[in-house]
Image (spheres, helix red, strand yellow):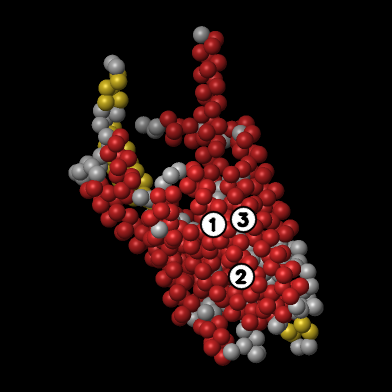
C-alpha cells in the first residue's frame, strides 16, 4: 500500500504548480540572477585588445584553460569582469574545509550551529578575496606580456593597468559569490553549481556548431560525429542511473506507548547514495588544477622558460600527468566530501537516542562502524564512477580536438544540477500541497 507521501507526490500536477506562489517567485529570481550573470560575462575589462586576446586563446584552447573558460561561460576568453568566475570561492571553500578538519578549534566552531557556520563562511569570503587578488594580479602581468605579431594585448601596460585589472576581476568574483549565495537562499538549488551550470549550458550551442563545422571541413568523419552524440546520450543515461543509485539500510523503530495509543514498531529504510559527494569532486579537482595552470597558460609564450613550457604541455588534455592528478583529486574529494556530508558516529548516536536500531547490529559504536564500512565501499564505487565519467571522454577530446562541452565533467555537472533542481522544485510542490491540505483541515474544523 502506498504511503501518504507517495500518494501526495503522485497527485502533483500543473495545477499545483500554478498555486505555488513562493516556488514561482524562487524560479523567477533564479532566472533573473542567471541573466545578470550572463550579461556580466560580456562586459570587458578596460585596456585590453580583444582581437589579440582571441588569437592567444586559440593557441591555448587545447589546454586546461579551455575547461576554465567552459565553466566561466566564455568569460575568460573575452576577459570580462567575470573572467575568474566563481573558482576562487570554490578554492577557498576547499581550503577552509580542509583546515576545519585539521584544526580542532575550527571543528568545534562548526559544531556550534548557525553562529559557527556564519564565522566559517566569513573566513571563506576573506580567503576568496585574497585568492582572487593573487590570480587577478598574475593574469594582469601575463596579459602585459601577450603579443600577436607586433600587436600587444594591453594598450597601456603599467601599474595602473594592473591595479585596475585586479580591482575589476576581484569585484566580479565577489559579486558572483554574493549572487550565488542569493540564489541558494532566495532561489532554487545550490547557487555556486547553478552559476557553473549556466556557463556550460550557454556554450552548448556553440560547442555543437563547432563540432558540426569540423565535420563539414572534413576534420572529423560523419560517422564519428554520430558516435559522439550517441556516446553523449549514453553518458547522460549512465549519470542518471548512478546518481539515483542507493543502498537502503533497514532501521527498526521500537514500539512506544503514549497514553492509550501505541506508536512505532515499524521498519524504515535509511538511503545511502552511491555518490554522496555528487558533483563536488570534479568541480573541486578542476578548480585546484586551474589555480596554478591559469598563470602557466598565460605566461607560456615564446620567451617563457623551458620548464614552464614543458609543464604546461604535460598538463594538457589527454596527457598522463593531467589525467593522473585529475583522477587522484576526484578520488580524494569524493572521500573527503562524503565524510563531511555524512558523519557515521553522529548518525549512529541520533539513532540510539531515538531508540531506533539496525537489526543484528548493536546500537552506538557498532552501528557507526557498520555505517563507515558501507560508506567506504559505496564511496569507492562512486569515486570510480566519477573518474570513468570525467576521464574517458578526455581521450576523445585530446584525440580529435572536440569542444569541452562534450566532456564527462561538463555533462556530469549539467545532468546533476538539473536533477537537483528538479528535486528542489518537487519538494516545494509537495510542501505547497501539504500546506493546502492543512488549510482545508483547519477550515473544516472551524465549520464543525
Above or below — where is 368 with respect to 143?
A: above
Q: Which mark is residue 124?
A: 1
Which of the two labelled residues, at mark 1 and mark 2, occupies the earlier sequence position?
Answer: 1
- In this rendered view, identify the residue nearer to me: 102 or 302: 102
- Residue assigned mark 3: 177
The answer for how far apart the CA atoms under marks 2 and 3 are is 17 Å
Measured Cα–Cα span from mark 1 to mark 2:
15 Å
Q: Residues within 10 Å of mark 3 (few under 14, many from 20)?
A: many
Can residue 444 be seen by looking at this rendering? yes
Q: Secondary structure at mark 1?
A: helix
Of all residues, the one furthest to the front in this rendering is 105
Of pointers 3 and 1, the one earlier in the residue sequence: 1
Tell me which residue sits at (63%, 63%) in the image. Answer: 85
Callout in the foreground (2, 3): 2
Pick whichever, 13 or 44, lies toward us.
Answer: 44
Where residue 18 sits in the image (x, y, percent)?
Answer: 64, 34
Q: Nearer the viewer, mark 3 or mark 1?
A: 1
Is there any visible trace of residue 50 in the rendered image? no
The spot of residue 254 in percent (x, y) is 25, 31
Sooner in the amino-acid sequence: mark 2 or mark 3: 2
Mark 3 vs mark 1, CA separation in Å: 10 Å
- Residue 286 location (% of width, % of height): 52, 68
Q: Where 163 sits versus 373, above or below?
A: below
Q: Name the residue rendered at 22%, 48% in the picture.
A: 366
Q: Is 26 placed left or right of 427 in the picture? A: right
**Image quadrant assignment for residue 196:** bottom right
Question: Pointers 2 and 3 in contact (CB under 8 A)?
Answer: no
Provide the residue designation for mark 2: 134
What SS does tag 2 mark?
Answer: helix
Amino acid at each position: 500500500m502506498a504511503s501518504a507521501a507517495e500518494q501526495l507526490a503522485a497527485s502533483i500536477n500543473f495545477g499545483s504548480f500554478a498555486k505555488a506562489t513562493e516556488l514561482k517567485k524562487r524560479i523567477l529570481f533564479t532566472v533573473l540572477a542567471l541573466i545578470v550573470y550572463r550579461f556580466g560575462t560580456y562586459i570587458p575589462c578596460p585596456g585590453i585588445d580583444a582581437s589579440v586576446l582571441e588569437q592567444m586563446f586559440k593557441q591555448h584552447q587545447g589546454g586546461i584553460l579551455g575547461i576554465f573558460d567552459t565553466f566561466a561561460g566564455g568569460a575568460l576568453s573575452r576577459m570580462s569582469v567575470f573572467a575568474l568566475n566563481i573558482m576562487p570561492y570554490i578554492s577557498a571553500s576547499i581550503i577552509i574545509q580542509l583546515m576545519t578538519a585539521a584544526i580542532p578549534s575550527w571543528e568545534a566552531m562548526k559544531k556550534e550551529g548557525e553562529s559557527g557556520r556564519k564565522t566559517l563562511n566569513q573566513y571563506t569570503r576573506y580567503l576568496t578575496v585574497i585568492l582572487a587578488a593573487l590570480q587577478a594580479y598574475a593574469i594582469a602581468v601575463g596579459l602585459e606580456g601577450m603579443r600577436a605579431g607586433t600587436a600587444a594585448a594591453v594598450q597601456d601596460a603599467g601599474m595602473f593597468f594592473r591595479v585596475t585589472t585586479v580591482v575589476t576581476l576581484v569585484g566580479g568574483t565577489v559579486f558572483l559569490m554574493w549572487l550565488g549565495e542569493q540564489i541558494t537562499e532566495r532561489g532554487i538549488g545550490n547557487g555556486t553549481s547553478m552559476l557553473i551550470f549556466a556557463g556550460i549550458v550557454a556554450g552548448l550551442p556553440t560547442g555543437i556548431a563547432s563540432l558540426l563545422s569540423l565535420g563539414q571541413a572534413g576534420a572529423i568523419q560523419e560517422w564519428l560525429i554520430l558516435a559522439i552524440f550517441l556516446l553523449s546520450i549514453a553518458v547522460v543515461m549512465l549519470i542518471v542511473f548512478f546518481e539515483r543509485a542507493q543502498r537502503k539500510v533497514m532501521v527498526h523503530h521500537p514500539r512506544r506507548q503514549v497514553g492509550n495509543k501505541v506508536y512505532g514498531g515499524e521498519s524504515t529504510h535509511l538511503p545511502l547514495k552511491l555518490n554522496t559527494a555528487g558533483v563536488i569532486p570534479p568541480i573541486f579537482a578542476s578548480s585546484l588544477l586551474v589555480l596554478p595552470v591559469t598563470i602557466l597558460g598565460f605566461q607560456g609564450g615564446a620567451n617563457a622558460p623551458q620548464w614552464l613550457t614543458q609543464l604546461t604541455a604535460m598538463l594538457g588534455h589527454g596527457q598522463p600527468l593531467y589525467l593522473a592528478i585529475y583522477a587522484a583529486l576526484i578520488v580524494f574529494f569524493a572521500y573527503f566530501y562524503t565524510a563531511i556530508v555524512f558523519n557515521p558516529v553522529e548518525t549512529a548516536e541520533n539513532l540510539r537516542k531515538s531508540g531506533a536500531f539496525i537489526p543484528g547490529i548493536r546500537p552506538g559504536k557498532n552501528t557507526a562502524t557498520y555505517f563507515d564500512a558501507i560508506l567506504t565501499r559505496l564511496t569507492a564505487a562512486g569515486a570510480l564512477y566519477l573518474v570513468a565519467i570525467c576521464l574517458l571522454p578526455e581521450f576523445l577530446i585530446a584525440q580529435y580536438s572536440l569542444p569541452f562541452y562534450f566532456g564527462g565533467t561538463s555533462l556530469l555537472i549539467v545532468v546533476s544540477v538539473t536533477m537537483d533542481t528538479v528535486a528542489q522544485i518537487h519538494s516545494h510542490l509537495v510542501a505547497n500541497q501539504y500546506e493546502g491540505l492543512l488549510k482545508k483541515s483547519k477550515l473544516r474544523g472551524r465549520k464543525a
